Amino acid sequence: MFEEPEWAGAAPVAAGLRLVTPQTRPAAASQIEGSKRRQLLATLRILEAASLSQQPPGSPPGSDYEEEEVVEQKKQLPKALFANSSAKGGGKRKKKRPKQGPPCSDSEDKEVERKKCHKQVFDKDSAEEKRKKKHQKQTSSNSTQHLDSVDQTDHEAWKSTATNNLPKPSLGSPSPKHPSTLSRKQWRNRQKNKRRHKNKFRPPPAPDELPAKDSTEDTEVPPAPTPNSQETRAGALRARMAQRLDGARFRYLNEQLYSGPSSAAQRLFQEDPEAFFLYHRGFQSQVKKWPLQPVDRIARDLRQRPASLVVADFGCGDCRLASSIRNPVHCFDLASLDPRVTVCDMAQVPLEDKSVDVAVFCLSLMGTNIRDFLEEANRVLKPGGLLKVAEVSSRFEDVRAFLGAVTKLGFKVISKDLRNSHFFLFDFEKTGPPRVGPKAQLLGLKLQPCLYKRR
C-alpha cells in the first residue's frame, strides 16, 4: 500500500486560507486619461505582484492560468527535475498506482524508498510553487479586471457629471461649449466695460488728428426773423389783446344793463353805437355754449300756432325769431342790428293798444324796471293774448313769487318749463288790466343780475 503524500493533508489547510482582496482604486484615478492612466495601472499591477510574492505559501491554486505557470516553471527549474516531475504527475493529474512486481532485495528496496521520498518532497515543493504562481496570476487578473471596471465606471460617472454640470443654453443665447462660458448678456457687459476702460486711459488726440470742421458750421447763425413772421406774431398778439379788451367791455356793459333802468341803457348806446355791437357779440358767444337756445324753443312753439298771429318781440337783437317763423313780427330793441328793428325803450313801444296776439321776452327782462316792460306788454296785447317769457334760471330766487307778481299785472299762468339747466320758460295769458296800482310793491319781480366773471 502506498502512503499518502504529505502535501495531500496540506490541501485543506490551503483551502481554508482566505483570498487576498484587491485594493480599491483611489478616487484620483477617475481623472487620469490616456497614457498616464495606463502607466498607473501597470504600476499598481507590479506593486500587487510584489506584495503577493511575499505572502506565505499555501495559497489556493487557480485554474485559469495553469498552463502559463507550467511554462514559467520550465524556465526556472532544471530540465531534469522538470522532466521527472512532468513524468510522474502534475497538479491536476491523478497519481497512477505502480504495478506490483516481484519482490526485490533490501538494497533495491532502500533505493526505491529513497527515490520515493525524494519524489514526495519534489512533488510537494512543485505543487506549492504551482499554487503560489497560480494564485498570483489569478489575483493579478482579478485586480486588473476590477481596476478596468472601476476605471470604466469612473470614466462614465465623470462624463455624466460633466454633462449635468453644463449650463443649459437659453433660447436667445448660443449653446455654450464649456461650463464656464459666459452668457450673451454677460459677454456684452464685459466688452462694454473693456471699451470704457480703454477709452478712459486713452490719451487725448492731437490737434492735427481732430476732424476738420466745415467753415459753414462755425459761421452758422440762426436765421433772422423775417418781417412777415414778426407781423404775424404782432397780429396774433394784437388779436389776443383785443379779445381781452372786448371781454372786459362786455362785462362792463352787461353790468350797466342789469344795474340801471332801460332809459339809461338807451342813452348809453345812443352815445356809443359800437358798444351795442360789442355787447351783442359777447352775448352770442355766451349763449352758443348752451345745449339749447331759448329763441329756438319759442320759435318751435309758435310754428305750431296759426301763422296769422301778430307777434311783438321785445329785445329782438338780430331778429332771429322773425327769421324763424312765418308770423308778422314787430322787432324792438335799444339799438339796431337789422333793418327790421325799431329802436326804442321797451317800456314805451310805438304800438297801439290791443294790437298784437303774442308778446315775447327772450332773455330781455333786463334793468331795474321789469314791471314797466310787463305793463307795456299787457297794454299792446289783445284780451286772451299770449305772453312768453324765457330767462336765465340763475336769476330766480323764488319762482312762485315771480309767478304771483306777474298774475297781479293781469296775466294767468298757462305753463312753465323748469327742466332746462340754463333757462326757464313760462307761458301767460292776458286776463285783463293790472289789478294793482302803480305804487304797489311787487317784490317777486326783482330778479338777480346776470353777471359774468372774468376768466
Image (cartoon, helix red, strand yellow):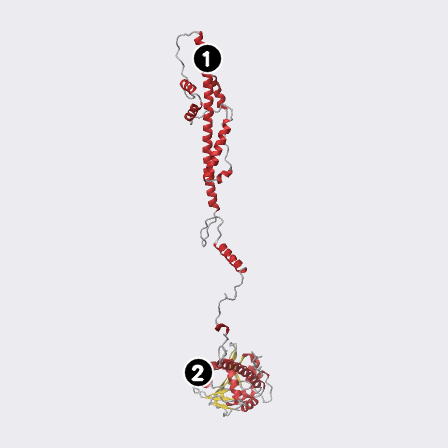
Q: Is mark 1 on a helix, strand or loop?
A: helix
Q: Can the viewer see residue 153?
A: no
Give the percent coordinates (x, y) of residue 139: 47, 29
Say which of 175 and 382 sits in front: 175
Q: In which quarter of the image is the C terminus?
A: bottom right
Say which of 209 and 442 sits in front: 209
Above or below, 87 relative to 422 = above
Task: Give the amino acid at mark 2.
Answer: Arg
Residue drawn at (57%, 89%) of the image: 264
Residue 234: mark? none
Q: Residues within 10 Å of mark 1 (few under 14, many from 20)?
A: few
Residue for badge 1: 114
On the picture, is 398 further left or further right than 105?
right
Quadrant of the image occupied by residue 268:
bottom right
Give the percent coordinates (x, y) of residue 340: 46, 89
Q: Is mark 2 on a helix, strand or loop?
A: helix
Residue 303: mark? 2
Give the percent coordinates (x, y) of residue 228: 48, 81
Mark 1 or mark 2: name the one nearer the start of the chain. 1
Task: Give the amino acid at mark 1.
Answer: Arg
Say which of 189 and 335 sits in front: 189
Question: Circles 1 and 2: CB distance less than 8 Å?
Answer: no
Say which of 124 and 266 sits in front: 124
On the picture, is 261 further left or further right than 65?
right
Q: Can the viewer see residue 342?
A: yes
Give the percent coordinates (x, y) of residue 207: 52, 66
